[in-house]
Amino acid sequence: MRIALVQQPATDDLEGNLARGLEAFDRAADDGADVVAFAELAFTPFYPQRLATPAALEAAESIDGPTVRAFQERCRERGVVAVLNLFERDGDRTFDTSPVIDADGTLLGRTRMIHITDYQAFHEQGYYAPGDRGLPVFDTAAGKIGVAICYDRHYPEAMRALAVAGAEVVVVPQAGAVGEWPDGLYEAELQVAAFQNGYFTALVNRVGPEERLTFAGESFVCAPDGTVVARAEQGTEEILVADLDLEAVASSHARRLFLRDRRPELYADWI
C-alpha cells in the first residue's frame, strides 16, 4: 500500500480549502498513492479554537454534503481510497467524523471521535457529541483501515480494539499545535501503539497559523515493529508518501504473539 498524508493549512475560504484538498488528492494519485488521508477538519478552520455558539454549529455539514460527494467522484475517477475528516451534522447533533471512501467511490462508512476533550483553544465538547459508531475497520481496495481521530489515540483500549477488529493501518487525523506536547512524545505514543497492536499507524496533522493556534505539521508513519518509516517537516505544506508492506502486519510480534496470548476473560470488565 502506498499511503499519502496531506499536510495542508485551512482558511475561512471553504471552497478554496476543498479545491486545495482535491488538487492534493490528484497529486498523490499521480504519485501512485493507493490511499490519501487528510488531517482533522482538513477543509475548514479549526472551529474549536473558540467556544461553540449556535452560529458556529451551523458550519457542520451532512455526510452526503459537498465534501464527501466531491471526494466520492474523485475516488471513482482515480481509483484511490480517501480517508477524510469533517465537522458532521446528523439531525440536531454534530460530530468530529472521518468518512472512508473506497477506490470505486463507495462511502464505506464513518468513524466518529469517541473521546471529547475540552481545554483552552480546544473547546471541543461544545462542538462534538461523543461518537456512537464504535471503532469500525473498513475493508478497502487497498487494505483494512481503521481510524482513531485525534484524542482517541490516547486511549490504549481504543487502539487495541482496532487491532482485534483486524486493522492493518490506523489513520490518525490530528489537529496538533506547535508546542502542544514535549518533543517526540506523540510520535513515541504511536510507535508503541503500532508495536503493541501489529499495524501501521499514520498520523496526519494540519499545519499553519490560525486564529489562536499554529498547527505543527510533522505528520508521520510508524511500522508494526515500532519504527518511524516516514516523517514530514514542521510548518510545511506537503504530501508525505510512504510505502507500507502489509505483510509486516501478519509477521509482527503483536499478531504472532501478543494478540494470540491475550486473556480478555480476565480483564474485559476492567476497561
Image: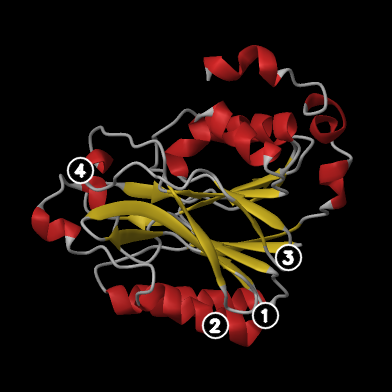
Rounded to the nearest angstrom, the CA distance separating label 2 from label 4 is: 33 Å
Q: Residue at x 79, y 31 (%)?
A: 254
Q: Earlier in the sequence, mark 3 or mark 4?
A: 4
Q: Is residue 100 left or right of residue 251?
A: left
The CA span between labels 3 and 2 is 16 Å
Q: Quick one: label 3 or label 2, which is nearer the N terminus?
A: 2
**Residue, x 60% and y 83% (percent of image)?**
76
Mark 2 vs 4, N-terminal side = 2
User: Label 3, on which residue?
Assistant: 142
> Where is mark 1, residue-wise?
79
Question: Left or right: 73 with respect to 119?
Answer: right
Q: Which amino acid is tagged 1?
A: Gly
Q: Is residue 29 left or right of residue 15?
A: right
Residue 151, percent from left and from top: 43, 37
Question: Which numbered tag is attached to residue 74?
Answer: 2
Separation of marks 1 and 4 at Cα, in angstroms = 37 Å
